[in-house]
Amino acid sequence: MSEEVTAEILTTHVLELASHGQRLDGRGPDEYRKTTVEPGFVTTADGSALVRIGDTAVLSGIKLEPGKPFPDTPNAGVLTTNAELIPLSSPVFEPGPPQPGAIEVSRVVDRAIRAAETIDLTRLCVTPGEKSWVCYVDIHVLDHGGNLIDAAQLAALGALTHATVPAKRFGIAEADYPLEVLHYPVECTFVRLGEAIVVDPTFDEERAAQGRLTVATDETGRIVAMQKGLVGAFSPDDVKATVERAFQHGERMRAIARGGGP
Amino acid sequence: MGSVGAKDVPVLLSPEGLRIDGRRVNELRPIKITAGALKHADGSAFVEWGQNKVMAAVYGPREVHPRHLQQNTKAVIQCKYNMAAFSVDERKRPGLDRRSQEISKVIAEAFESVVFAEEFPRTSIDIYIEVLQANAGTRCAGLVAASVALADAGIPMADLLPAVAVGKAGGAIILDLKKEEDNFGEADLPMALVPQSGRLVLLQMEGHMTREELATALDMGVQGCRGIYEVMKQALRDRYSVAPAPEVPA
């Protein structure tokens, strides 16, 4: 009973179902799995959120530390995003340095946060050219049931939304204050299964997918990031239709990230 | 676990014999264990113990990676203990450090003493421990989580492995140190017990104690482990919805 054989059988089954507008778990093509955001999961972090999308679980923690601004942006703080696809979360991950998959997740999430100007980096500057806050967004995948990008982005946004700048601890100000979040970018990922394009793919659907498309939107109606992944292709009309669907899902996901409720 | 900056040493033991969080010297922090916390691992457990939050997953018996570690007569037991960057006050740089490697090694060796590895030759049993939130005693919390995860994965073992740290703070021998007691105390002694045999399969010590104090500490640790053992068994019963075992007449 090799893993490759079961994967092959499942792939055929997933594609067959998709051709009839059906999915393995009974969802419709435009239906997300149950999504929850639990802010403040880790109290040692300056902000944190545990996100579950179906049986995918992703934890993000924020740490803010004083550091030095980059020479080319002396008036801005520093934002760094790091995702770890740890072998605890899936039989397919092995220990070792970050693999391309982990790097893709962290870069796509980072791009959406940055492009949407989620936080005003100039407010993280303490002394121009000398001292600024470094905002570390660390993303830990705990349970890999597919669609890591959306879960990671939602976890990062949830953690940033509830984060505190530890100014008192580092002797920079009299009191800690909330990290101000200006925009709420949300990623929405689709995969192609034959002629169907379905939202929020599971692990098995991602393995069967003939192309993956992620669209990040914000609350002002902007598209702030996109990423096409896996082997496969989308027509321009596919892309336009997908963007419309991403805006609709984005609205709901934003409410979940901001409120923490379903 | 390093302390942030130089702070005044807190009073670790009140004149009434109470500790910084109001516990008595031989009292454990509240501990909650959830067996089967993850969907995609063969076995898993989540341990919330005081301010610690630790997740463990077990995969296997499965193929050995890297291949050259494979053994013809038994399974190899591999353990990776890792701390999340945001699990401590000062952000920890992600990746392996020497402390994590040492802890991984002693935990793997502790399990080698109880797992029936010879039943699965040429395979690997992989244990992953992720510390999500740390407040002293993470190796013990990780070991407890991993032990329940191994049972959840159906790996045959001689026994579960409860673990706890004993130490010395404010001049007294205390059970289950929290962060301040670890940072400012005089000694730290983590241990793991095989309850059926009464033997220790993990034992480390840092600090200073007299011979008499060590004897007290060992007794206190064994008692602490026996308390944790009950919580571990209950977590597995809860997971598999089995009524408490009936009293077996001797």
Image: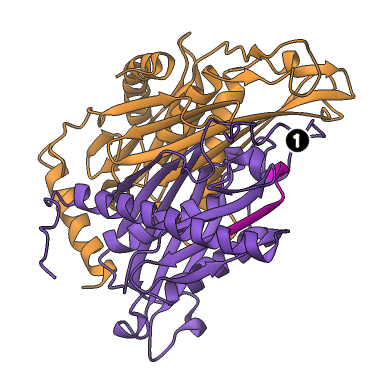
Chain colours: A orange, B purple
Residue at position x 73%, y 39% from top? Answer: B3
Residue B86: x, y in percent?
59, 37
Please tell me in which quadrant of the rendered image residue A193 appears: top left
Identify the residue under disc 1.
B4
Above or below residue B19? Residue B95 is below
Residue B68: x, y in percent?
51, 84
Residue at position x 56%, y 53% from top? Answer: B166
Q: Which residue occupies the foreground of this view, A170 or A220? A: A170
Question: For mark 1, does the 10 Å Cα neighbourhood hold few (<14), some (14 to 19), or many (20 or more) residues?
Answer: few
Q: Look at the image and say whether residue A72 sits in the magenta stretch.
A: no
Q: Residue furthest bottom?
A: B72
Q: Which residue occupies the foreground of this view, B61 or A209? A: B61
Q: Is residue B219 left or right of residue A82?
A: left
Residue B1: x, y in percent?
68, 46
* Region rendered in magenta: B183-190
Q: Is residue A22 left or right of residue B142?
A: left
Above or below residue A213? Residue B200 is below
Asked whether residue B205 appears in the rendered view, the answer is yes
Disc 1 chain ID: B
Residue A236: x, y in percent?
38, 30
Q: Which residue occupies the foreground of this view, A134 or A172? A: A172
Above or below residue A94? Residue B36 is above
Q: Look at the image and say whether residue B189 sits in the magenta stretch.
A: yes
Residue at position x 81%, y 17% from top? Answer: A172
Asked whether residue B93 appears in the rendered view, the answer is no
Tell me the kind of residue under disc 1: Val
Above or below residue A206? Residue B65 is below
Please tell me in which quadrant of the rendered image residue A255 appears: top left
> Element at badge 1?
loop
Residue at position x 56%, y 42% from top? Answer: B134
Quarter of the image where the C terminus of chain B is located: bottom left
Give the tally of numbered discs. Answer: 1
